[in-house]
Structures are given as structure tokens and as C-alpha cells.
Amino acid sequence: MGKVTGFLEIDRQVAKYQPASDRIRHFREFTIPMSDQEVQKQAARCMDCGIPYCHGPTGCPVHNQIPDWNDLVYNNNWEAAIQNLHSTNNFPEFTGRVCPAPCEEACTLNLEDTPVAIKTVEQAIADKAYELGFIRPQPATIHTGKKVAIIGSGPAGMAAAQQLGRAGHEVHVYERESKPGGLLRYGIPDFKMEKNFIDRRVEQMKGEGVAFHCGVNVGVDVKVEQLLADYDAVLYCGGSETPREAGIPGIELSGVHDAMPYLVQQNKRVGRENIDSVGWASDPILAGAKHVVVVGGGDTASDCVGTAFRQGAVKVTQLDIRPQPPEKEDKLAVWPFWATKMRTSSSQAEGAVREFQVATLEFVGEDGQLTGVKCCEVDERRKPIAGTEFIIKADLAFIAIGFSGPFKDSVVKELDGKLTLNTDRRGSTNVVANDRDYKTSVDKLWTAGDVRRGQSLVVWAIREGRQAARAIDEALMGSTVLPR
């Protein structure tokens, strides 16, 4: 619980950022780390709140034991802290950087808008553990003789691979791209998470016996049926990658793009890779000296905003069909759940113009080239209000309104007619499996992560990968010691 009176004596502090004028000049992380002593003071603020809602499911999908490792950090026991954190979360250096921290929303101190800086402490524990050499390969001492193939090396696939490898199974991970990490590597910009953190984990997992096969598009280069024949179990963690159809006239104009090809390209440039990508556009998309419009109000849209500024965009406008939320939520009505309130991402704070309660009516252009985005105001039911139309100048526009499921040209296409898919009310098509055994309608095939639950958070993908690993281990061995 940290220091008994810590929350009364110590103000909330989180890591500071480099000034926007400096950080938009590079693609590196721009958070300024806090000293160990500062982190320990923040951990000391964790109070004896009786019922720690930060644990989850309201707070943390992986059920991190947050008060426990806050207390360990406060008492300068970093090794025990990382051991405790690893007991629920395979990759705290990922979540400590990119998770939106629902745990802090659920913190009892958030009733006074001063939650414990949980995310900052989590990242500090992981970074300190690497610094002190506490994170090393943990190869299995007993081998089961069972072989498991994992399709996709995003957070769900990586978490499952590590759990199954440590359980003694022979694990092979198949990745379509040239390096492991999935959208952790190719979707999340380097200024939010540099990719050396993924590389370190991959090396650890290789030391634990996990084999990575990159540049292999399962369902095209290697058939799923072949994997099912060669392995005792196959886990499909392909993610949710098909962009949701916007249905906006003028989408065919040059200069209009889905968000993900843009982000993938820039991540590949930073990683010194060829920008050609399976499933994504390969023609260069650059925002330098352009007026940019981003359609959508979520994290992917924000990542496009930050990337455009770093490429030298003249102006970036972000369109959100939702009404502008209140500056502060009604705590008694929503706590400990995630609140709808005005939030400004680091990318938006770099100078984006934000338009709320605005619908995108049409992309307009001349001679096949985008010149503007026609918009209008909408009412509370998101219906256009007559007479409110206006046009925003645009040389480049990105559609970032979410994803509708896995790519249909590989695994899903091969297993057409065998694999049960479910279409939700928004038109997303996900692979059907429950969250207890994660089994699909195909024998020996399991699934986890966004391909099953739909687009979600990295922390949810890690949870599903861990749970699916437990289900597979139990199915292969009759029992399991892996945590659920």
C-alpha cells in the first residue's frame, strides 16, 4: 500500500514531455523519465483503499496487482516488483508506454482527480528491471514434446508464445511482416514506443526456445491446413486489420488514404525497412508541406496527427463526429469506469485543430486530386444539420474510424466455410470463440486477441494471449499450471 500517509503528503506527478516544438523534429520517444526517488514517491501515494478497483476488470484487464508492486517500489525492492508485475503481464514496458491506463481512472484517488501515477510506475519498473539485469530468458526445464504454431506476433501472439514456451512446448510463431511485433511495431509510432523494446523481448523469447518465422503469410505462403497437420495446436492471433468502410463520396481521389497504410509506412521508414507491405499500400504517403485532415477521434487518428506534424505538415485538422465532451466527468455517476471527458493526446497538443460534432460529407478534388473535405455540423443523433456545410482545405486526408476484422485474403479465405465468423452491429467480422477455452469451429485451432474480440487495447490482447495459452496447455496436457 506504499506509505500510509503518502497520498496526503505527496502530490501526483507524472513524467514530463519534451516541448512540442522540439519533439515534432524527431520520431523518438519524448517522455522525460523520472528519477528512481521520484517514482518511489509516486508509488508511496498508493493508499489502503479497502477495495482496489485498479486491479480489474474495471481497472486492469490483466489484473495487475498494483498496490503490491507500488509497495515494493516504495520499499526499493525493484526485483520483487518486476517479478510481481510479470506474474500478470508479460510485457509491462509495452503497456507502461501505450496503455490509456484505465487503472488510473479506477483509482480511489481519482475521485479527487489525483490518481496514483500507476502507468508511470509500471514503465519505471520494467525499465529498471532491464537496467539491473533482472529480465533474462527463462527456458523450460521440462519439455512436453508438443508443438504449437502461432499465427501473428502482435501482443496476443507474443504473450501466448512466451507462456507456452515456458510451459515446455515447442513454439513456432509465424509473422507476415519482416519483423515480429505486429501492429505494436508497424502501427504504433516510434514516438510513442520505440521498437528496441520489442527486439529485447524477442531475443528473450528466442532464448526460451521460441522460434520466429517472419515474412510468412499464413494462408498464402503456408497453408493453415499444413500447420494443423504438423502441429498439435495452432493459435490464430491475426489482429483486426481491415479498415472500416467509410462510405464517403470521393474516397477514390488521390490523397485520400486509410490511416494504417500511412502509419505502417512511416514505422518502416524509421526502422529502415522497405515500405512495401503485404496488405497495405506501397506508394509513398508523405505529409510534408501539406494541409492534412484526419477523419476520426480515436488513438489511430491521433497517431496520424503526430506523424503528420513530424513529416512537416502545414496544418492538421482532426474531425470527430461525437460532441465535444465535458472538461470533467460526474465522478459519482461513472467512477470507477472509464469516463467520457475532454482528453487531449500528446499529438493533439502539438497543434491540431479539432472539430467536434462534425460529419464528413464528401472528399472534393480537381483532376482526380484531393483539394478539400466537405463537412457539416450534426445533431445529437449524428444527423446533418442543413445549412451548416463548410469545406476544409486538404491536400491529404486519412480515414481513421476503426477496423472491421482480420484481413480476408489469407487465413479466413483458406478456411472459408469451416471457420465460424460473427458480424456485430457495426459490421465487424470476428472469429468466433469464447473467452474460456478460445477454441474455434476448426479442430486444433484456437484464436485470441483482436481477431476474436474486435479492435481493442494492447493490454486486452496480452490478457487474451495468456488465457489462450492456458487453454491450449490444458487441452494438450490434461492440466495446466499457467495462470488464467
Image: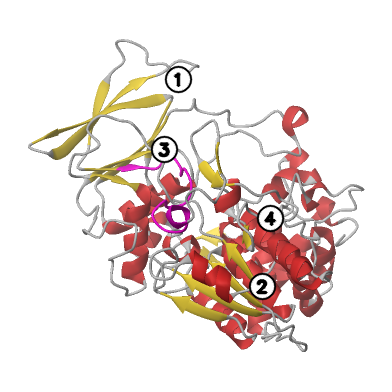
Which residue matches tag 3? 296
Q: Are marks 2 and 3 in contact (CB under 8 Å)?
A: no
The residue tagged with tag 3: helix, strand or loop? Answer: loop
Is residue 192 in sight in this rendering? no
In the image, residue 17 lies at what x, y percent? 51, 59
Which residue matches tag 1? 382
The residue tagged with tag 2: helix, strand or loop? Answer: helix
Which residue matches tag 2? 126
Q: Nearer the viewer, residue 247 or 311?
A: 247
Residue beneath the point at 72% across and 46% down:
114
Query: Which one is earlier in the sequence, the residue at label 4 or at label 1?
Result: 1
> Which range is magenta?
398-414
Q: Are marks 4 and 2 in contact (CB under 8 Å)?
A: no
Which residue matches tag 4? 438
**In the displayed structure image, the side of residue 170 where residue 64 appears, left or right:** right
Q: Are marks 4 and 1 in contact (CB under 8 Å)?
A: no
Quote the CA–CA distance across marks 2 and 1. Answer: 43 Å
Looking at the rendered image, the disc whose residue lies closer to the viewer, 4 or 1, is 4
